Image: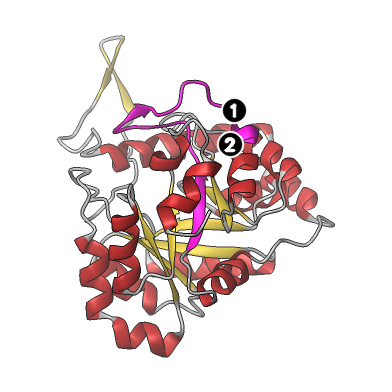
Amino acid sequence: MEIRRRPPNPAIAVASLQYQIKSPDAEPRNILEKIVWHKETEVARQREKVSLQDLQQQAQGLPPTKGFVEALRWQADQQRPALIAEVKKASPSKGVIRSDFDPVAIARSYESGGATCLSVLTDSEFFQGSFDYLVQIRQAVNLPLLCKEFILYPYQIYQARVAGADAVLLIAALLPDKDLNYFKRIAKALGMAVLVETHTAEEFERALGLEDVRLIGINNRNLEDFTVSLKTTEQILTTYREAIAEKQTLIVSESGLHTPADVKTVTAAGAQAILVGESLVKQPDPGGAIAPLIGRPI
């Protein structure tokens, strides 16, 4: 699936009136493309307020990051799936998931409930997230944190580091291999881990070919129609089982995990970790819902 970047669409003067010349491809074709096009203008505005150089200076002298991959691997070694619990208020497909949204309270609940790591949505336009939430959660919990953002530029990696993230998400559908490797090197220089997210077998194969890939996510959501199927994880892991073992890559299954049976399905297929947001965050006690979901004794 090709996700286009925003095309140029200049205005021209015609008889003292301004008209926009619009090509047939002047509108986004799907929700992810819409997000990407908005993100490009959003980051441009953010650069006007805080420059990349300013962020780089702020990143110097920060406390060391927490071991995101190490935490996941340790938990997986205990014969229980590692859990990345997501602090998530809304999504384009579901709307507002939790109206009484308190990011710090949810994060603390996840920590007390036994989450391995946390994922924090920072996109404001489509997920009602915020980098402020990331800052607040970093101050409130000791777990490793993933910045869940649509990263298109190195600028955003520095944003995540300054806000307190220990890891960043890189979406294979949005970035060519050259950028994925380059962004991974930037993250590594900042002491951060990278979760490379894939949606198809083709993207997964690309991710396996990246430099020093330690963590790959398989998102069970189809980006074209937003349907979800756990067969995505099952089929990909069946196909690439030997290559995964050879590279000792840790696999995270994402989306569509609502019941203990769902978790058993993806872990039986070979996923060592899961990323869960909606099914936990909508519970009255998000942390209390963790043990039943992953089959851990309460």
Asked which quadrant contains residue 37, the reply is: top left
279 horizontally vs 193: left or right: left
Identity, as a three-letter code, of the amino acid under mark 2: Ile
Compared to residue 238, the image places residue 50 above or below, namely: above
Q: Which residue is mark 1?
A: 102
Specify the segment rendered in magenta: 82-106
Asked which colour scheme the image uses, the reply is secondary structure
Measured as percent of width and height from the top left, residue 11 is found at 32, 24
Image quarter (top left, top right, bottom left or bottom right) of the N terminus = bottom left
Q: Residue 106, labelled with which disc?
A: 2
Q: Any magenta on residue 83?
A: yes
Q: Tag 1's secondary structure? A: loop
148 horizontally vs 244: left or right: right
Dot 1 surroundings within 10 Å: few (below 14), some, or many (20 or more)? Answer: few
Marks 2,1: beta carbons within 8 A: yes
Residue, far left: 24
Q: Is residue 221 visible?
A: yes
Measured as percent of width and height from the top left, residue 158 is found at 65, 52
